[in-house]
Image (tube, rainbow, N blue to C red):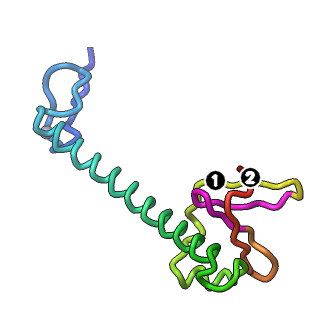
Amino acid sequence: MIIEKRYCKKCNEPIYGRSDKVFCDDGCRNAYNNIHRKETNDCVVKIYKQLRLNRKILEKIYTGGVGNVRVPRNKMLKLGYNFLYLTNFQVDYKGDQYEYCFDYGYLVLDKDWVLVVKDMFE
Ligand SMILES: [Zn+2]
């Protein structure tokens, strides 16, 4: 029988006992899980913050805050918009793709202009 030596995922010390053990003790398991949970949470908070900012910018444009629902893409970037973060997208009958941040969205027009919309597909 070959016994493979295993090491604690947290402290790297050798593990003794049951073959399915991943941590040397409860202290290491708790410490490891707490760090992992915090990392996951930080990541979700960061993405959610950007999504909320994106929505806020779309809302501001849509409700007349910048004068027109048709704006240059650059202007949105300057306001802090991040085009990598969206919640969903919809394609209309013409094949145009609208990208949404919750209830507000946009369609990229010619020459990097953007048309901001709300709930078109509800
Ligand atoms: Zn350990």
**Mark 1, residues whose alpha carbon is within 10 Å: few (<14), some, or many (≥20)?**
few
Which mark is nearer the camera, 1 or 2?
2
Task: Name the quadrant where ligand 1 sits.
Answer: top left
Q: Say the numbered circle drawn on residue 74.
A: none
Quick one: 28 or 18, which is closer to the camera?
A: 28
Q: Say the numbered circle drawn on residue 88.
A: 1
In the current view of this chain or complex, which residue is farthest to the front? Answer: 63
Residue 118 lies, with reference to residue 38, above or below; the image says below
Q: Magenta stretch containing residue 35, yes or no?
A: no
Quick one: 20 or 81, which is closer to the camera?
A: 81
Q: Position of residue 57 (x, y in %)?
A: 55, 74
In the current view of this chain or complex, which residue is farthest to the right? Answer: 94
Question: Mark 2 is on which residue type?
Answer: Phe
The magenta segment is 95-106
Q: Position of residue 74 (x, y in %)?
A: 63, 84
Q: Which residue is mark 2?
A: 121
Q: Position of residue 82 (x, y in %)?
A: 55, 71
